[in-house]
């Protein structure tokens, strides 16, 4: 089990440190885990001038799975676009063809009050958002900022091929089959041709999955329904940009984006695992960050890449135990619980493990 660890920037090193302790514990219990670290994002820019060094890409390719902390920070925002930390993240997703991004939004019962929505709206919430990750307006050409008729214009291209839609649709139907067999595909077909194709292809793929109830929803309505009645959803599938936005929205239903893991898979279930949140530069280095999303990303890694369901459940069980014991980082703290820092909640997860 070769794991390439990319700690990244901001809180990245702190949260991956806790996830590494979990991996180390599993290793001493007999799982053949090997880890190797490499640079990505701003720290790679500082060390080598580029956000995704060739050596990092090679190591990631040779590994069975990648664990990533987070990238980015204000000190790199002024750099030319191709040197920004985010380019490293987009580059590794594209280079490893990690087209299927799984972002579960699960509400732990202990955190029902941490959500800004009424507890009865979110209690028992369990949604899986499947976001296409290597296409769409994120990568479409042409793109740029240029002069046209004496005016500066900025432009991007929203584009999907039938094959790209077909493969992400298949992944979503397969996931729906293992859950409650309901899939909602999100598009903007009333305005955008690209997403008319999306709807047509998803509907076609559905023919092979008669047991899955497929519905379609326009993205603006989906954004509204997520806060109006989120429990109507089981699995949602959408393109790269809509998925970016809707997954942040869904994370807040669960109280904190600090709880949400993610998996980005290729066609062979090789994957990169990372928390859904960013590098939180404002709290970096202070020992305040919530490492649970990263630890839960390790659970996803064991489940999806290594087919170690038991070990995955063990980690998830340990996290639930820590929450039940009343330990909270600042982002999920409420009165009557115990506020602790990154390392202390990591200690507690290890003890529960
Ligand atoms: C995410 C992030 C990234 C994205 C950024 C950091 C490039 O927001 O993983 O959701 O837009 O995909
Ligand atoms: Mg995002």
Image: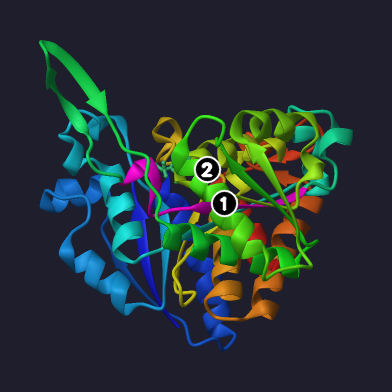
Give neighbour class at mark 2: few <14, some 14-19, many 20+ (Cα, 10 Å).
some
Q: CA distance from mark 1 to mark 2?
A: 6 Å
Say what secondary structure mark 2 lies in: helix
Relative vertical location of residue 130 with respect to residue 336 in this rendering, above or below: below
270 left or right of 321 in image:
left
* Residue 196: mark: 2
Relative vertical location of residue 194 with respect to residue 150 in this rendering, above or below: below
Answer whether residue 99 is visible to the viewer in this image: no
Comparing 20 with 194, the one in front is: 194
Give the residue pinned by disc 1: 200
Position in image of residue 329 (x %, y %): 63, 41
Q: Which residue sits at x=52%, y=72%?
A: 23
Q: Quadrant of residue 258?
A: top right
Position in image of residue 322 (x %, y %): 73, 55
Residues in magenta, as a range: 126-139
Say what secondary structure mark 1 lies in: helix
Position in image of residue 56 (x %, y %): 24, 65
Tag 1 and tag 2, C-beta contact below 8 Å: yes
Give neighbour class at mark 1: few <14, some 14-19, many 20+ (Cα, 10 Å).
some
Relative vertical location of residue 206 with respect to residue 285 in this rendering, above or below: below
Comparing 167 with 40, the one in front is: 167
Q: Quadrant of residue 74?
A: top left
């Amino acid at each position: 089990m070769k794991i390439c660890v990319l700690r990244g920037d901001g809180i990245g090193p702190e949260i991956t440190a806790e996830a590494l302790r979990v991996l180390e514990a599993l290793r001493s219990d007999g799982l053949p885990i090997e880890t190797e670290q490499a640079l990505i994002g701003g720290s790679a820019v500082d060390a080598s001038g580029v956000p995704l060094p060739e050596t990092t890409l090679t190591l990631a390719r040779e590994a069975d799975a990648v664990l990533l902390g987070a990238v980015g920070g204000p000190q790199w925002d002024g750099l030319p676009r191709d040197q920004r930390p985010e380019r490293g993240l987009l580059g590794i997703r594209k280079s490893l063809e990690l087209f299927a991004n799984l972002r579960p939004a699960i509400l732990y019962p202990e955190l029902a009050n941490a959500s800004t929505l009424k507890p009865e709206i979110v209690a028992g919430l369990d949604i899986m958002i499947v976001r296409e990750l290597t296409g769409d307006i994120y990568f479409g050409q042409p793109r740029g900022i240029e002069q046209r008729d004496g005016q500066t214009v900025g432009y991007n291209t929203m584009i999907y091929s039938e094959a790209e839609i077909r493969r992400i649709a298949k992944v979503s139907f397969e996931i729906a089959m293992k859950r409650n067999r309901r899939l909602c595909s999100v598009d903007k077909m009333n305005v955008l041709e690209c997403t008319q194709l999306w709807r047509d292809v998803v509907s076609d793929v559905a023919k092979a999955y008669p047991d899955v109830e497929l519905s379609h929803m326009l993205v603006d309505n989906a954004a509204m329904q997520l806060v109006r009645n989120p429990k109507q959803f089981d699995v949602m599938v959408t393109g790269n940009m809509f998925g970016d936005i809707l997954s942040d929205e869904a994370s807040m239903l669960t109280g904190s984006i600090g709880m949400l893991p993610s998996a980005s898979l290729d066609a062979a279930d090789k994957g990169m695992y990372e928390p859904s949140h960013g590098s939180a530069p404002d709290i970096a280095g202070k020992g305040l960050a919530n490492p649970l999303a990263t630890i839960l990303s390790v659970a996803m890694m064991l489940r999806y890449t290594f087919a170690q369901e038991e070990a995955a459940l063990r980690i998830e069980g340990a996290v639930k135990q820590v929450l039940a014991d009343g330990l909270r980082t600042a982002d999920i703290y409420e009165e009557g619980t115990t506020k602790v820092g990154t390392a202390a909640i990591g200690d507690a997860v290890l003890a529960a493990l």
